[in-house]
Amino acid sequence: MTKGQIEAKLSEAISKFEIEVMGRGPKQIRTFILQDLIVVRLNGFLSPSERKLAESNQGVELLKKLRTTLFENARNDLEVLVKTVTNTDIISIHSDVSTRIGENIIVFTVGENLEDKLKAKLGD
C-alpha cells in the first residue's frame, strides 16, 4: 500500500473507532504519516450538547475530563487498530481536544520511520 492509502485507511478506522467508542464520529478527518509520527486531525466531532456544555469554563473542564477518560479506557483498542493497519509498534499516543473549534488531535509515535519504510517498499 502507498502512504496515501495507509493514511486513508487509518482515517477510516479511527473515524469508526470514534463512532463506536466516543459516540460520535468527526465531520472531517485527516491523517498524516511524518517519519515516526502519525498525526490524526479530527474536526466537527462534538455533539450539540457537548458544544453547549463547552460554553462555560466549568463545562470545558468537565468535557475534557470525560473525553480524556473515554480515550484512556480505549487506548489499547486504538493501539491495536493502528498497529494492524501500519504493521509497526506503537510507542506512545497523545491526544488533545479544542472545545473552542471542535478539533481533536491524536499523535502516535511509532517504532520506526514509517515514511521511509513505505518509500522503500515502493522502490522494490
Image (cartoon, rainbow, N blue to C red):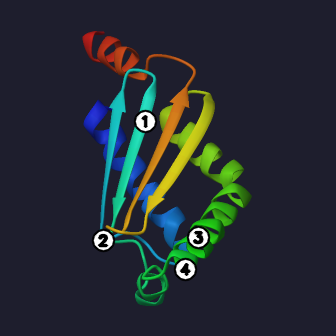
Label 1 vs label 3, nearer the camera: 3
Residue at 27% x, 17% y: name it. 122
1 to 115, vertically: above or below:
below
The span from disc 2 to disc 1 (Cα, nearest Å) is 20 Å
Q: Which residue is mark 2?
A: 27
**Which residue matches tag 3?**
61
What secondary structure is found at the residue carrying circle 4?
A: helix
The amino acid type found where label 2 is placed reads Lys
* Contact, mark 2 vs mark 3 (Cβ under 8 Å): no
Q: Quadrant of residue 110?
A: top right
Judging by the rendered image, the residue that carries numbered circle 4 is: 59
The residue sitting at 67% across, 51% down in the picture is 75
Pointers 4 and 1 in contact (C-beta within 8 Å): no
- Asked whether the beta carbons under mark 2 and mark 1 sit within 8 Å of each other, the answer is no
Name the amino acid, label 3.
Glu
Viewer-proximal residue among 33 and 83 = 33
Which disc, if any, is residue 115?
none
* Image coordinates for residue 25, horizontal then vertical, percent: 43, 72
| Label 4 vs label 1, nearer the camera | 4
The quadrant in which residue 80 appears is top right
Asked whether 21 or 55 is in front, the reply is 55
Residue 118's place in the image compared with 19, above or below, is above
Q: Name the residue tied to disc 1.
A: 38
Label 1 vs label 3: CA separation? 27 Å
Work out whether mark 2 precedes mark 3 in sequence or the reverse, and give the earlier one. Answer: 2
Q: Amino acid at mark 1?
A: Ile
**Quadrant occupied by the N terminus:** top left
**In contact (CB < 8 Å): disc 4 and disc 3:** yes
